[in-house]
Each structure stands twice: as structure tokens, then as C-alpha cells.
Image: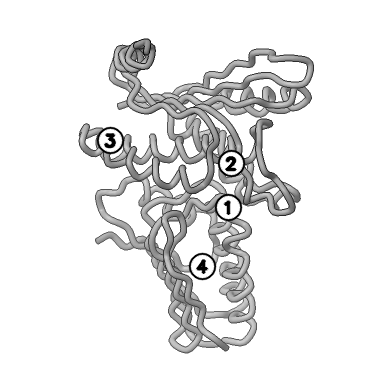
Amino acid sequence: MDDSLYALYQELKKKKILFCYSGPISQTSLEGVGNTLRRNLEYEEAGNKATLSVFSIFVEQVHNILNYSAEKLGYGEDIDEGLRFGIIVIGREENGDYYVYCGNRIYNTDIPVLISKIEEVRRLNKDELKSLYKERRKMAPETGRKGAGLGLIEMARKSGKPLEYSFVTINEEFSFFSIKVVVRR
Amino acid sequence: MQNLLIEKTNSTPYINFNAVSGVLQIKGESFPENAAKFYNPVMEWLREYLDCTSEQTTLDFEIVYFNSSTSKIFMTIFDVLDEEVKNGKKIVVNWRCDGENETAIECGEEFEEDLRYLPFNIILF
């Protein structure tokens, strides 16, 4: 037996990654892991505000995977019953800040809309983000969508730093989308 | 009309809406996968209740954490109530939070800023 798992474990430790999950994800796993994550942050004495910000970004990111990942299994009539695939990493920057880093497959055709949504949020300062959040919250919900369209704005507000993102082309149909949100400690 | 009672789960709050006392309580955390679906029966109950009551109504919110799609539902609830108060109904919202939960206090303030008629009290404990 080789020792590649230990190498991976060491690599994660070295990179100050406190949590890493790759594979099928559901609301149930979000609830369990979210609870453990909060306890872990409390032990680390991250502070109430930072703990809640990291947890909140984690929830929004996982819901984005559940709503939008193009890699899925078992979706039938009821959209809430299926599994979606993605990868979630929570770690610490060199300076002690926390980050929540998520990735999933998306359809290439969805990329332009996603870029414009992220860029819109990246351009705004704290007060502008607050106004946009409140404006969107007052709007009637878009039909056929589970989310409220507030997740990206919420993450940017909790972060206080511009959202970082990238796309890697997988093939003609899919790309891998990743987004990283930093929380100041 | 019947009272509405929903037990809390790992991602949804305890909900106890009492049509007789006029006290509507929401307590816990809210980050369901599909907030619109979860709150649909709550919204229906509320609309039916408001159609038939003229008594004092108190909404007690004690929410430690809620996600962005829940935030939208809460705003919809407060907008409905704001309109009812404008038309003469006696309704008050108590937004209860731990004095150390800065985030929950700010969230309450942001709802309050967007309301015109509905009395919205932020109560710290």
C-alpha cells in the first residue's frame, strides 16, 4: 500500500486547510458539516462575527452547488431529492484570515451570465453592496429558481474583500467554476 | 382557525403561530435548501389569519442565523405586515437577539430601515 493519503493529509495541513470535501453533497451534509465547522471555529476562538461570516459564506456556497452544479445524480420529478457534486475547501491564509473556496462543473453556456453577476458585485463598495442587497430583496422572486439571487451579494458583504473566481474549460459542454471568499479575522 | 405549529429541524426554525392569542413566534435558525417551499404554508397561514383578525398581533422573531433566501422571505412577510398596518391593523414585530450577536442586530436594523408603518422593536437579551 502506498502512502499517498498521508501525503495528501500533510499537504492539507501545510496549506492550513481545516476542512476539505469533494463529492456528492446534499442539504443533510451541509447541516452536519456546518455544525462541526462552527464548533471548530469556536475552539479556535475565531470570534462570533468571523465564525458566523465563515458559516454564512459556507451555506451560500453549498446552496450554489446544490442549485447550479452541472454534475448531478438521481434528479427526477422532485428537484430537492437529487445529489449534486462539488468541492469545498475552508482554510487559513498566511495572515490568519479564513477563506471558503468552492468549485463545481457548470455548463459553458452559463458562463457569461455568471461572470456579469460576479463582476457586478466585485465593483461595489460596502454601502453599494448594502443598497443592492436591499433592492434585490424587495424585488419579486424570479420564477423557476430556488435561490433568491442574493447569495453572491451576501458573500461579498460578509467578506469585505472582492470575490475571486476562475473558470477552467473541461470540454465543449462543461467548465470547472471556482470561487474564493475571504473573511478577515 | 387552527394554530400553525412546525417543529425545528437542523436548518429550519420552530414556528408557533397562535390565532387566538395573536402571538406568532419564529425561533431558531433558517437555511433550508428551498426557502420558498418551506415558508409557503407559513405565508398562506399568515394571509388567511390577517384576513380574519382585527386583534393586536405580535410577531416574535428570535433568529440566530438565516441565509439569503430566507432573508427575502422575511422581507416579504414584513412588507405584507407593513401594508396591513398602513390599513389600520395593530401589529408589532419584536426582533429578539443576543446582545453579543452583532450580525443578528444589524440584520434587524436593515429590515427596520426598509419599513414605513410597521413598528419594529429590536430587543436585546
Residue B9: x and y in percent read: 43, 60
Label 4 CA crowd tier, 10 Å (few <14, some 14–19, many 20+)? many
Q: Are marks 3 and 1 in contact (CB under 8 Å)?
A: no
Instruction: Estimate the spatial distance between the alpha carbons at disc 3 and disc 2, rounded to whole Å.
Output: 25 Å
> Which quarter of the figure has residue B27?
bottom left
Query: Which amino acid does the dot numbered 4 rest on?
Result: Leu
Q: Secondary structure at mark 1?
A: helix
Residue found 47% across the figure and 40% down from its top: A59
Name the secondary structure under disc 4: loop
Q: Earlier in the sequence, mark 3 or mark 2?
A: 3
- Who comes first in sequence, dot 4 or dot 1? 1
In this view of the protein, which residue sits in the foreground, A46 or A69? A69
**Helix, strand or loop under label 3:** helix
- Quarter of the figure with residue B35: bottom right
- Does residue A78 lie above or below A24 as drawn? below
Given residues A58 and A84, the one toward you in this image is: A84
Residue identifier under label 3 = A41
Quarter of the figure with residue B86: bottom right
Q: Nearer the viewer, mark 4 or mark 1?
A: 1
- How far apart marks 2 and 4 lie (CA) works out to 24 Å
Q: Position of residue B121 (x, y in %)?
A: 39, 64
**Depth-wise, is mark 3 or mark 1 nearer the camera?**
3
Residue underneath mark 1: B72
Mark seen at residue A150: 2
Front residue (pair A80, B53): A80
Q: Position of residue A161 (x, y in %)?
A: 45, 23
The answer to whether residue A94 shows anywhere in this view is no
